[in-house]
Image (cartoon, helix red, strand yellow):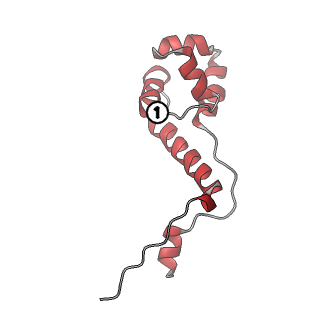
Amino acid sequence: MTSISKTITEPPGPMRTPSHPGDLVRYGILEPLDVSVTKAAEMLAVRRATLSDVINGKAAMSAEMAFRLHKVFGVNAELLLRMQNQFDLARVRENAKTIKVKRYHRKAA
């Protein structure tokens, strides 16, 4: 394996699981602004249960929810989606041994 392919294919060393983007919404937006989940759900035009699931890490941050949060609170939607992607990938890596696939190797010409 060349150094470039190692860089591309191997995950970084040990690290903590990234935060779910719901943590940022709860602790970085709602709490500092003293906005309840119920009020925020009204402002976002979503069900309270939907927002609650996201901020409690029970549901993923969708692109639509990220955009709604951007429109209402000015939070960067791309940041929320990157956080969700990093969170999801870390969870998959935790269970990497259960994914049974074989590495593709191109046949020599």
The location of residue 50, given as percent across then percent down, is 54, 21
- Specify the quadrant of the image occupied by residue 45: top left
Indicate the secondary structure of the residue bearing disc 1: loop
The location of residue 40, given as percent across then percent down, is 55, 15
Q: Residue at x 46, y 30 (%)?
A: 66
- Point out the residue furthest to the bottom here: 109
Q: Is residue 83 above or below residue 2?
A: above
- Point out the residue furthest to the left here: 109
Q: Residue at x 61, y 16 (%)?
A: 37
The location of residue 47, given as percent across then percent down, is 51, 15
The location of residue 78, given as percent across then percent down, is 45, 39
Q: Residues within 10 Å of mark 1 (few under 14, many from 20)?
A: some
Q: Which residue is mark 1?
A: 62
Task: Tally the numbered discs.
Answer: 1
Q: Residue at x 49, y 70 (%)?
A: 102
Left or right of 70 in this view: 83: right
Q: Nearer the viewer, residue 54 or 34?
A: 54
Q: Is residue 58 visible?
A: yes
Q: Residue at x 61, y 49 (%)?
A: 91
